[in-house]
Image (tube, rainbow, N blue to C red):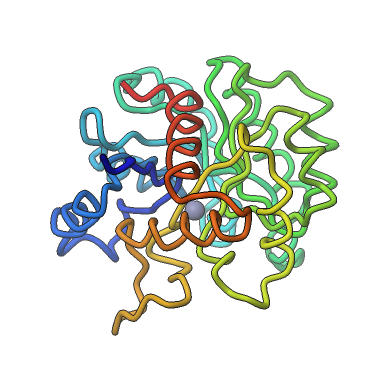
Amino acid sequence: MTTLLVDAHCHLDLPAFSSDRDAVWERARARHVTRAVVPSVRPDTWRATLDCALPRERVVALGIHPHALLTLPRAALDRGLKELAATVQAHRDRVVAIGECGLDASLDPAIVDPMLQRQVFLAQVAVAAALDLPLVLHVVRSHALALTLLRSVPLPSRRGMVHSYSGGPDLVRAWTELGFHLSFSGAITRPRARSPIDSAKAVPDHRMLVETDSPDQLPTGVDRSDRRCEPCDLPVIAQSLATLRGQTLEHVSQVTTDNACALFGFR
Ligand SMILES: [Zn+2]
């Protein structure tokens, strides 16, 4: 029997998949990727994200990505934050998490005010804690700050995941002891990506997840003319993780599937 896989983070709701979403998902299923978490990036696309849910196969997260602050008008941002909890509550059949949200220090501080990023992040953490739903975090070059902020506020009981973890092996323990899962993407298939590779070796079994981050982050070794990553590429990432950790693909598949199901409560 082949072990199933859960893609813990893929943007199937984006226009990159609008013309062939069903075919993309069929290809994933054929490679035993039978479940996925689809995170949203901004309030004006929450509807598309919600529509991307599929009973027992695809669940969604609602939130506001730090990159959305580059273009989202202030009024739309305020409205989104105000409506987040109620929108989640109205769709509890499919919304299993809050995100993706977080902190990204690669954004130009002259364009996106770091204090605003922080406020928008913490507002979403508060919603996650109030609704007791796990967080889907995007953290880039801000791991120490994110950890400090998260340690200072109430958190949801199942905490959440850091997607496409890039914090380095020295912070793996801080994240996992706070109760967060770390999710690994195609970055670990690039031999020179020392930080994610060393982190993938350091994470304990009970805190690891795998994701494609489709349509971004096509794994090394997958040849596709349009360079679009798809959920069907997940076995390549799971195999890389297994090789790095000296484990079997079956073991990594089983553990990451169990972790994802427990974290996101797949039914
Ligand atoms: Zn993402």
The answer to whether residue 83 is seen in the rendering is no
Query: What is the x, y in percent for residue 198?
Result: 73, 60
Residue at (40%, 46%) from the top-left corner?
Answer: 7
As drawn, 71 above or below 162 = below
Q: Nearer the viewer, residue 257 or 40?
A: 257
On screen, residue 149 versus residue 5, left or right, reads right
Give the percent coordinates (x, y) of residue 40.
42, 45
Vertical position of residue 176 compared to residue 152: above or below: below
Q: Residue visible at 76% across and 29% down?
A: 178
**Residue displayed at 65% across by 40% down:** 120
Residue 253 found in image quarter: top left
Please state if 138 lies on the left or on the right of 44 as rendered: right
Compared across the picture, whether 31 is left or right of 234 comes to left
88 sits left or right of 49 in the view: right
Near-viewer residue (52 or 44): 52
Is 256 in front, or is 144? 256
- Residue 112 visible from this viewpoint: yes
Quadrant position of residue 89: top left
